[in-house]
Structure formats: structure tokens, C-alpha cells
Image (cartoon, rainbow, N blue to C red):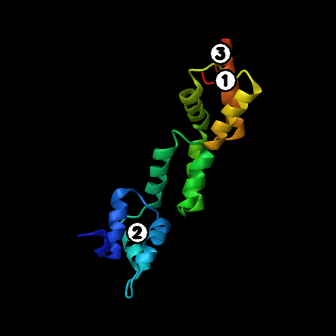
Amino acid sequence: MGFAKLSLKGRALKLLAQREHSRSELESKLARHVEEGDDLAAILDELESKDFINSERVAASVVHRRASRMGTQRVVQELRSKGLDDALIKSTAAELQSTELERALQVWKSKFGSREPANTPQEKAKQMRFLAARGFSGDVVRKVLKSAAEIEDGEGSCFE
């Protein structure tokens, strides 16, 4: 049976089988397929009541896919774009904050770890932009670059 002949509920289930979707995402993806007599809100309510749509799972899925490569700001931005509840976003952000420094260091190491530390202002700015573009806070970016310079100077690390 082709995707074009699926009912709204069938389309929703097919989308949910591919990955977790928030109610807001499903609503926007399915809205153009609503035909006369279809009640999109009722279908979404039913899927939510049966736990096919679950905001906590959507948030966990985003964190699982993105947190190892992205900072808290970028992950929060993606959660907001999915139309998730502010309280859920805030609690997820709080959890991510606790590991942001370690995650930023790992991202920096994977990109710049085999090179010399940033010796020129241009190289330092490049590395800072790289981490900032991935959603890491300015404070964390500065700590990562300071730590990288200290490791290279043999002074140890602020991560020990």
C-alpha cells in the first residue's frame, strides 16, 4: 500500500515508526493531508493516550542524537523547534549543563586535538567559532581552549 493512500492515522504511525515525533511536528506534517471528515486533533489525542506520542521520549531522542556533538544551546533550540513544553526543555537543559564542559572538550579534541594548540589569535578565534557554532556557551569555550593550552604546556588539566 503506497504512502499516498494511507489514512491520517496510518501516516502518523508510519512517521512515528521512523523516529520519535512531537505532537506539534506530526500536526504540521499531517495538516496538508487532512481531508473532509478527518479529525487530526482526535487522531493525535488517541496516539498520545496510547503513548505513541511522548514528549519525554522525543527529548531523550534529541539528546541521544545531538548531545555528543552539540552544546546545550543547540540542543535546546532543536527541542523548541519541536514544540516541546518549556518545563521539559528547562529540565533537559539543566541535565545537559552538567556535562557541557566534558562534551565540548571531546568535540574540540576530535576536531583540533591532533594539532598544536591555538598559538595565534586567528587560530584561537577559529576554534572558538567552531565550538560556539555548535551551541557551546562562551564560558565553556574559553575553559576548553584554556585547558588545551595548559595540557600542551604540561600544567595538567582542569578536567582531572
The residue that disc 3 covers is: 152
* Image coordinates for residue 140, horizontal then vertical, percent: 67, 35
Disc 3 residue type (three-letter):
Glu
* Mark closest to the chain's N terminus, 3 or 2: 2
> Which residue is at the front of the view, 147 or 88?
147
> Which residue is at the front of the view, 104 or 45?
104
Q: Secondary structure at mark 3?
A: helix
Which-is-in-front pick, marks 3 and 2?
A: 3
Label 2 packing within 10 angstroms: few (<14), some (14-19), many (20+): some
Image quadrant of residue 134?
Answer: top right
* Image coordinates for residue 102, horizontal then vertical, percent: 58, 32
Q: Secondary structure at mark 1?
A: helix
Q: Secondary structure at mark 2?
A: helix
The residue that disc 2 covers is: 48
Image quadrant of residue 4?
Answer: bottom left
* Mark closest to the chain's N terminus, 3 or 1: 1
Which-is-in-front pick, marks 2 and 1?
A: 1
